[in-house]
Amino acid sequence: QVQLVESGGGLVQAGGSLRLSCAASGRTFSTYVMGWFRQAPGKEREFVAAISWSGLRTYYADSVKGRFTISRDNAKNTVYLQMNSLKPEDTAVYYCAARAAWEPQPTKSHGYPYWGQGTQVTVSS
């Protein structure tokens, strides 16, 4: 079991940056694959990025590739999402999630049994 708490959301102008954090409880954090998802009003939840337990493998949605960076610090039980060059279409509630195993395209939300409560990111134009 792992419990996840996101932080770092807020209001930012287009072109700006934010760093989201997701703090995890539990001694087995370092064994989990971690992912970030987002959900905009009226839209389905969509995959953003994922990182393997070691941090050596990452995977990004095409819409954020080159702008967002996922990283983790296993000593701090925390995963991060650095978001640069933000656009109004990045506005959403951002969720972190955890799963046991890596797969080549870890994009399906149903593959993640553990979820945080979400943090709001709003990008103004």
Image: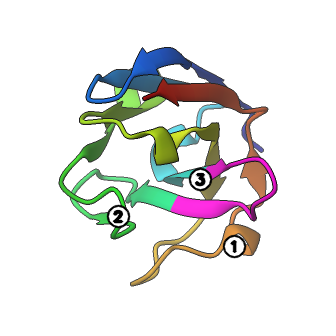
The residue beneath circle 2 is: 60
Q: Residue furthest front?
A: 125
Residue 108's quadrant in the figure? bottom right
Q: Name the quarter where the C terminus is drawn.
A: top left
Q: Which residue lies furthest to the bottom in this view?
A: 104
Q: Is mark 3 on a helix, strand or loop?
A: strand
The residue beneath circle 1 is: 111
Sequence-first tag of 2 and 3: 3
* Residue 8 visible to the viewer: no
Q: Residue at x 43, y 17 (%)?
A: 12
Q: Is mark 1 on a helix, strand or loop?
A: helix
Give the residue type that dot 2 points to.
Answer: Tyr
Q: Which residue is drawn at 48% across and 25% down?
A: 124
**Residue 5 vs residue 10: left or right?**
right
The residue beneath circle 3 is: 37
Q: Where is residue 7 in the image (x, y as percent from the top left)?
A: 58, 18
Magenta residue check for 41: yes
- Crowding around mark 2 (Cα neighbors within 10 Å: few <14, some 14 to 19, many 20+) is many
Range of residues picked out in magenta: 38-47
Sequence-first tag of 2 and 1: 2
Q: Is residue 74 above or below residue 34?
A: above
Label 2, label 1: how far apart the Cα atoms are: 16 Å
Q: Where is residue 23 in the image (x, y as percent from the top left)?
A: 57, 24
**Residue 40 vs residue 48: left or right?**
right
Cβ atoms under marks 2 and 3 closer than 8 Å: no
Query: Which label lies toward us, 3 or 1?
Result: 3
Q: Residue at x 39, y 67 (%)?
A: 61
Q: Where is residue 63 in the image (x, y as percent from the top left)?
A: 37, 63
